[in-house]
Amino acid sequence: DVKQDKRNYGYDPEVNPRFGLKNFPDRGVNIVASLVRPYSKGFVKLRSSNPFDHPIIDPHYLEDERDVEMLKYAYKKCREISQAPS
């Protein structure tokens, strides 16, 4: 028998009322699609010479159409996997 993980990760309705579901399952699965090697390239640069100033960060998420197409494919695969019989 698998030992049940007692951590609730913030999904316990008494801890986080935003997830106030009455019949929240004891077990579940998350499927995540992400780009490990995106084609879109962002940048990080210094805001000033002051080392305590936060840098300027612009990730340019999904600016390359190949990234968009790859994520669409990945989401379709996630849906396919989630609908497969157990």
Image (cartoon, rainbow, N blue to C red):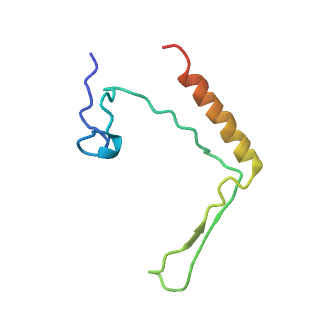
* Quadrant including the N terminus: top left
- Indicate the position of residue 55 as horizontal and vertical percent values: 53, 74
Residue extending farthest to the top is 85
Residue 52, position as x, y percentages in the image: 44, 80
Query: Which residue lies at the image location 30% right of the left edge and 31% below the top edge?
Result: 22
Q: Is residue 46 above or below residue 36?
A: below
* Foreground of the two, 6 or 37: 6
- Please state if 39 lies on the left or on the right of 12 as rendered: right
Vertical arrangement, residue 32 with respect to residue 52, above or below? above
Q: Residue 15's image quarter?
A: top left
Q: Is residue 69 above or below residue 41?
A: above
Q: Nearer the viewer, residue 43 or 10?
A: 10
User: How many numbered badges does the structure rendering display?
Assistant: 0
Q: Residue at x 68, y 38 (%)?
A: 72
Q: Nearer the viewer, residue 39 or 68?
A: 68
- Residue 34, given in percent of the width and then of the height, sits at 58, 42
List the single residue furthest toward the right: 65
Which residue corresponds to the image point at 70% horizontal and 46% vertical from the top-left? Answer: 67
Q: Is residue 41 left or right of residue 50?
A: right
Left or right of 72? Residue 23 is left
Left or right: 3 as drawn, with respect to 77: left
**What residue do we see at 57% from left, 78% from top?**
46
In x, y percent, where is residue 78? Answer: 58, 30
Rendered position, 54 above or below 73:
below
